[in-house]
Amino acid sequence: MKTIFIAGAGRSSTALISHLLENSDRHGLRVIVGDASLELAVNKCNNHPNSIPTLFDVNDAVLRNKLVSQADLVISLLPPDMHHLLVVECLVHGKHFLSASYVSAKVAALEPQAREKGVVVISECGLDPGIDHMSAMEIINRLKSQGANLISFKSYTGGLVAPESNDNPWGYKISWNPRNVILAGQGTASYLWGGKFKHIPYSRIFTDIETLEVDQIGRFDGYANRDSVSYLKIYGLEGISGLLRGTLRQRGYCRAWNVFVTLGLTDDVVRIPSSGSMTYAELVESFIPVHIKGETIAHRVASLCSLPVDGEAMTLVTWTGIFEDTLIGIENATPAQILQKLLESKWILNPEDRDMVVMIHEFIYDLNGESRRLTSSLVVKGEDSVHTAMAKTVGLPLAITALKLMDGSISLPGGLYLPVTKEIYEPVLRDLEKHGVVFQEKVS
Amino acid sequence: MKTIFIAGAGRSSTALISHLLENSDRHGLRVIVGDASLELAVNKCNNHPNSIPTLFDVNDAVLRNKLVSQADLVISLLPPDMHHLLVVECLVHGKHFLSASYVSAKVAALEPQAREKGVVVISECGLDPGIDHMSAMEIINRLKSQGANLISFKSYTGGLVAPESNDNPWGYKISWNPRNVILAGQGTASYLWGGKFKHIPYSRIFTDIETLEVDQIGRFDGYANRDSVSYLKIYGLEGISGLLRGTLRQRGYCRAWNVFVTLGLTDDVVRIPSSGSMTYAELVESFIPVHIKGETIAHRVASLCSLPVDGEAMTLVTWTGIFEDTLIGIENATPAQILQKLLESKWILNPEDRDMVVMIHEFIYDLNGESRRLTSSLVVKGEDSVHTAMAKTVGLPLAITALKLMDGSISLPGGLYLPVTKEIYEPVLRDLEKHGVVFQEKVS
């Protein structure tokens, strides 16, 4: 009997845990689920005989040691800056490690030890990053083997709400970590276009956008992710003239979100004194320059942002209730924390709501002297607010990779991997298809 | 004989070191000057018999221990995030500590220990913060004792170039840490106005400005410093309806600087791949969105910033040479590092150049039923590029405070102090006047 230890039983763990448990008898597996909330761990285990829910605090070194030493594989769904604590423990005990997060500098630094100790560490193995890497590499390698000359590659992913459950003008409900929704895009984004590196500062990331179309689903806003440039090497695309990875939102979302950015409401550093006894309207007012005049607060914000007060962007912003005299009710908070509290109360995924994951790849390439465009798109809808498309597309690649590592059908020398390696993405994509994660390709 | 250890012999140490050495015989003092560059330490000591130049690395715990244990007082001119290392050492050995920097969280955390061990730690004791605190508190306490009811207080300081040495359109040359010039204003600024807290995000800090006038000197741009709100309590001004601390620049500087901010060139996080073999024009181009068209790079930047290409702001930006095909020549640099390199080569304080420190306080208050306005302004010009007004106004308050701590004329129980305490600012302001640091007051 083999043991998998899952650290973190939050929103995105549902599909991972249930898929592992469903397959636990057949694979001779036992699954330990650890979370800072024992209740959450118990809930997610759902009394399955092969499950062991447990209280887990990643900062408790004794607990970390004990749980990792009992496992054959550790899967971390903890916040990204905590993975390295578990990776270090895995190196001590010679256990494999899996996560859906971007490789942090601290995890990257452990690569030589992983190689030396024969420990397999796989990162970026969820949705985005994850399924996007796998499906992109499958196409890149196929096109290369056909003799194509790749010109550019764009890849966008969004965790959205399905049209049938969309009852708010943003077309957005929270299906994953809401904090990441608020802080999205901060920093400077870098990508490659026309053979040149391009950069976008945070103040322009939600206006320097493009429109993407997915058959039968519609058109979306796409904004650039922070770092596309490092994927040139990871994807083996050195010499290509365009590479961009980005995020999808419903059309209109980005320009409306930019109102929050322009106001300064996405800052997560400054503390608002007496925010507990302030209203949302007072908070917004505190970010409007003294010299800006206007009949209502919405008029003043519209004037600040050079937007029509009755236009789409301002309509979306007004809908959130941020101009209303409602008490904020959290003390000494950052604007980002306050905005998160407000939007969590507005962008609720109701029990019956279906979320929707959309991914689109666009390759431009020359083949046999002809210029071609290949698009590959994925649309996955959730069942309800617990069995979300987000949890499924993050959890399934992790679960499938975990099962294949345990039964030896994925076998790698020790080291740090992304699922751009054929040995990982081929078998995982094949199994994902069986679960309805199917891309639609179109060549023109 | 008493010993003062000065850590850091950079640009702002000149006046501090020479003032202490000039007074060293009379006060029975010996001055150890430590710097990572022994040459710099030797230069600043200028063979004075009471001086000891030494190599010093604040990260060397053995050296730190040895030098602090030999001193009666430590003065740190190191970067702000290093002071706490020296304060900890001062607490171990029971030595006093002085700096011109803002109190960091790490230094603030040491206050209880300072109180317990009878160690006097004085921070914010240079120009701004420093002289501004002292002169403000002198006026605040005077007005209060007259029975005035304070309505608002604004205080602006700028390290500029004297009109007679001004030969560039920015009216700016580098008289202190150039890195701080590039990163100035980052974060969200907070101040109080009309009885309400106001906030300005970085993207608006250089456009949400006001004009300040100083008699016989001229008019300046003023932009808000990051945190004015915490000075409500420090200045004893709770209940006032306006409090703003800010920075002065020559008129036109701020709107021109905002072009760099809008482009994204002040970011100090993202690394520009192959910056070593790029030109400045190529760097700028990489920050211009693909969809922006224009005849020249200056036209495209003007269009991005909604500015006339032949207006003042664009003229200033063009003057820097940032649109030229000059090689950058530093590899894997951040935009902020690149901008710093360029401006250091343009904003040179030539040997004969005189810099100029300008400070202006404005108090609005009611006295005997009448509304009044008191302005107090300070203008200090440097002698040349070594004996700068900046070095003088940062160094003299430190030197004077140090001498008074050593001869016992400032005597305080252990603890963390700013020079808002009467026991510090009264004697120090009196001595500063003897050295030409004199405020001009006007009441209307």
Image: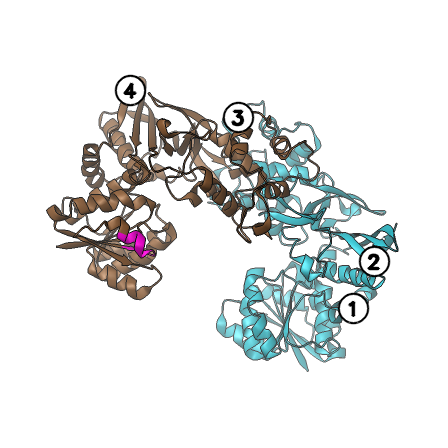
Chain colours: A brown, B cyan
Residue kind at label 4, given as amino acid type: Val
Q: Mark 1 points at which residue?
A: B426
Whether labels 2 and 4 belong to a single chain: the reply is no
Whether labels 2 and 1 belong to a single chain: the reply is yes
Asked if the residues shown at circle 2 and circle 3 are in contact, with their CB atoms under 8 angstroms apart, the answer is no
Is label 2 or label 1 in front? 2
Compute the Cα span from label 2 to label 4: 79 Å
Q: Residue A324, position in %: x, y?
A: 58, 38
Is label 2 or label 4 in front? 2
Q: Which chain letter matches label 2?
A: B
Compute the Cα span from label 2 to label 3: 51 Å
Marking on residue A259: none
Is label 4 or label 1 in front? 1
Q: Residues within 10 Å of mark 2 (few under 14, many from 20)?
A: many
Asked if the residues shown at circle 4 and circle 1 are in contact, with their CB atoms under 8 angstroms apart, the answer is no
Compute the Cα span from label 4 to label 3: 34 Å
Q: Which residue lies furthest to the bottom in this view?
A: B1
Q: Which chain letter matches label 3?
A: A
Q: Residue B157, position in %: x, y?
A: 73, 52
Q: Is residue A93 visible to the viewer in this orientation of the structure?
A: yes
Whether labels 3 and 1 belong to a single chain: the reply is no
Secondary structure under badge 1?
helix
For the point 23% across and 31% down, the residue is: A436
Report the side of B67 relative to B444 (left or right): left
Marks 4 and 3, the one that precedes in the sequence: 3
In the depicted view, which residue is nearer to us: B130 or A349?
Answer: A349
Compute the Cα span from label 2 to label 1: 20 Å
| Magenta range | A34-42
Residue kind at label 2, given as amino acid type: Ala
Asked if the residues shown at circle 3 and circle 1 are in contact, with their CB atoms under 8 angstroms apart, the answer is no
Q: Name the residue under label 2.
A: B148
Q: How many marks?
A: 4
